[in-house]
Each structure stands twice: as structure tokens, then as C-alpha cells.
Amino acid sequence: MANHSRPIFLRTVERAELERLHRSSSVPSGLSRRARVVLLMAKNLLGVEVARMTGYATVQISRLRRRFAGERLARLDDKPRSGRPSVITPRKRAQIVARIL
């Protein structure tokens, strides 16, 4: 069975949002990187080329293509991580930092 990648077609609004995310210095770096990957995939570049240009593995490119094709921009955000939630509230953290400084 041959491996065929799904073509990525972007709407004008999606392209504008992805370019904004990629250029912004205030968004997390992972999100900016994933936006760049989607923009490159929309140019019909092979997954291997996109991986070489972005530093991702080809498997990661394939996963990003599948995630974006499934739920579009909503799936570019980081997934929730496992583990115990923080017991320190943001207010308490600010108090600790203020005391240290």
C-alpha cells in the first residue's frame, strides 16, 4: 500500500492566522513552529523536505498533517500534558518571586 499524504488547502483566513502565529514573538515557540510547518505543507512540499527545513522528524510532520486536516487551527495548540496539577497558585508564586527579588 502506497503512502499518500493528504493535501493541505488553506482558506484565506486560515493562511492569515497561520502567518500571524508564525511571525508573532508573543506566542509559544512550539505553536509558531507548527504554524510554519502547516504553511510549508500548504505549498505542497514533501514531508521529508518540511522536516529538513523545520527540524521536526518526518513522523512528527505526518502527525501534524493529520491533526490539521482533522480539526484545522483548533489542533495546533499544545495538547494537555499528563502529571499532577500544580499546587501553588499563581498568586502564591508571585509572592514567592517578589520575596526572592
Image: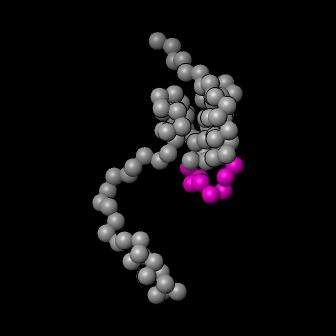
Q: Which residues are magenta?
A: 23-30
What residue is drawn where x is 43% and y is 46%? 79
Q: Residue at x 67, y 31 (%)?
A: 12
Helix, strand or loop for the magenta stretch, by majority: loop
- Residue most toward the top? 1
* Residue 5 sits in quarter: top right
Q: Does residue 75 appear in the picture of this structure? A: yes
Residue drawn at (68%, 38%) of the image: 16
- From what the image shows, is residue 15 above or below residue 78? above
Residue 47 image position (x, y, % from top left): 60, 29
Task: Say above or below: 94 vs 5.
Answer: below
Task: Give the farthest residue toward the front.
Answer: 13
Residue 98, placed above or below residue 63: below
87 versus 75 height, above or below: below
Residue 44 in which image quadrant: top right
Instruction: Report whether 15 appears left or right of 64.
Output: right
Is residue 55 in view?
Answer: no
The residue that appears at 54% across and 17% down in the rendered structure is 4
